Amino acid sequence: DPATVEMAVRLAEMLSGAGVDARGNPDVDRVIWAKVSFNCAMNSLCALLGLTPGPVLDSDELRGVAVATAMESCDVAAAVGIEVDRDGLMRTLDHVRREHRQHKPSMLVDFQASRLTEIDALNGAVVALGAAHGVATPRNQTLLALVHAREAEYSKD
């Protein structure tokens, strides 16, 4: 809303004045949804497979699952009025495959430490919003269920 945009612009100006490069982004919802769509696909797949993004995206089959999951999340974003730059999201996947092959997503780190993950705030939120807006989310639902199952196994101890 206009008041929030104005606050963000003022905050960015203050940060920049203090030497921290900052700028307001009127399309922040698009940026957030692009990140959510990416994370719904990559975080859960990497965690479940115990792999970093490089090997996941090198596999045609796994890349297909990642892309389909991300696009499903974009469909939910569209249903709530946010159009994600899907081509940009594809470029991000390509960039990560080339430049961040060995990055360990936080969900993978959480699995390795037997901690609960952020799955409910990512795939779980997409599933809930999809249901509320009549958008099918079978891939996100599957990843959500699989991560919950893994969490349940190590949470028993």
Image (spheres, rainbow, N blue to C red):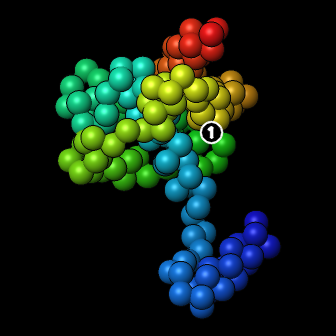
Answer whether residue 44 is visible to the viewer in this image: no
Which residue sits furthest front?
A: 157
Describe residue 32's horizontal placement relative to residue 89 as left or right. Answer: right
Q: Mark 1 highlights which residue?
A: 79
Q: Residue at x 57, y 70 (%)?
A: 25
How many numbered marks appear? 1
Residue 123 position in % (x across, y down)? 57, 29
Q: Is residue 15 in view from this perspective?
A: yes
Residue 95, above or below 127: below
Q: Quadrant of the C terminus?
A: top right
Q: Residue at x 61, y 26 (%)?
A: 116
Furthest residue toward bottom: 17
Image location of residue 30, percent across then percent down: 55, 55
Task: Establish if 62 lies above or below 23.
Answer: above
In the depicted view, which residue is nearer to us: 26 or 93?
93
Q: Residue at x 42, y 38 (%)?
A: 105
User: Residue 50: which quarter of the image?
Assistant: top left
How far across and down, in percent of the image, does residue 7 sit?
A: 74, 76
Q: Amino acid at mark 1?
A: Ala
Q: Nearer the viewer, residue 131 or 95?
A: 95
Residue 69, horizontal then vertical, whole percent: 44, 29
Q: Quadrant of the N terminus?
A: bottom right
Residue shown at 56%/9% (left/top)?
A: 153
- The local secondary structure at tag 1 comes to helix
**Tag 1: Cα neighbours inside 10 Å, few (<14), some, or many (≥20)?**
some
Left or right of 50 in this view: 119: right
Task: In the displayed orientation, state which residue is furthest to the right.
Answer: 3
